[in-house]
Image: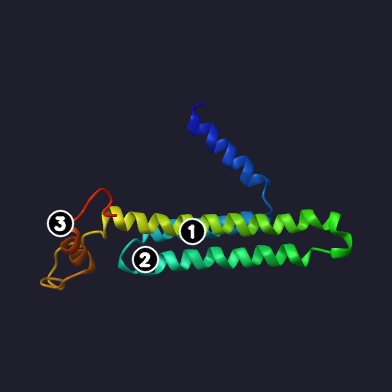
Amino acid sequence: MGAIGEHADNLWTVFLTLPVITQSAIIILLVFGITAHVAYGERVVHDGPSILTTGGIFFTFLGIAQGLYGFDPTKADASIPILLSGLKTAFFASVVGVFAALTIKLRYACFGLPTRRHDEKTEGAITLGDEHKRIFSERSVGCGL
């Protein structure tokens, strides 16, 4: 098995050891991220990153709340695993939400918006993609960063 296959197996093993709420948060954020890439366009570029980041923050607070809810200060030793379980949700949800948002931003920075087919309705209209090309055509270096 190659190095990529071993890393994928390790990620899957880690995923399976996470609490169910953390797994759910990761799946929800990944589904929204993939959906954003499938429906990629001006609206996704504008709204997608903030929605994904906000989703990550929501699950962060949910995970912290879950951990604190189960924490009993009078039985701190027994409560630490519950607190850590909630913090796992918080950490992983934040990472996945920000990662998904970054993929949209990087796609836009590297490739811009998809070009639309020429039709009579858009003839002569200037799109965000046209403006992007016009503005960055002279100074485009690498991924446009």
Q: Amino acid at mark 2?
A: Val
Q: Amino acid at mark 1?
A: Val
Q: Earlier in the sequence, mark 2 or mark 3?
A: 2
- In the rendered view, does 102 fall on the left or right side of 1? left
Q: Quadrant of residue 105?
A: bottom left
**Residue 44: assigned label:** 2
- In the rendered view, does 68 fall on the left or right side of 122? right
Q: Nearer the viewer, mark 2 or mark 1?
A: 1
Q: How many marks?
A: 3
Q: CA distance from mark 2 to mark 1?
A: 15 Å
Q: Earlier in the sequence, mark 2 or mark 1?
A: 2
Proximity of marks 2 and 1: CB atoms separated by less than 8 Å: no
- In the rendered view, does 69 fall on the left or right side of 16? right
User: Pointer 3: what residue?
Assistant: 138
Q: Residue at x 72, y 64 (%)?
A: 66
Q: Quadrant of the C terminus?
A: bottom left
Label 1 secondary element:
helix
Q: Amino acid at mark 3?
A: Glu
Task: Establish if 51 lies above or below 142.
Answer: below
Residue 15, position in %: x, y? 62, 46
Report the front residue among 35 and 137: 137
Residue 77, position in %: x, y? 85, 54
Residue 139, position in %: x, y? 18, 56
User: Pointer 1: what residue?
Assistant: 98
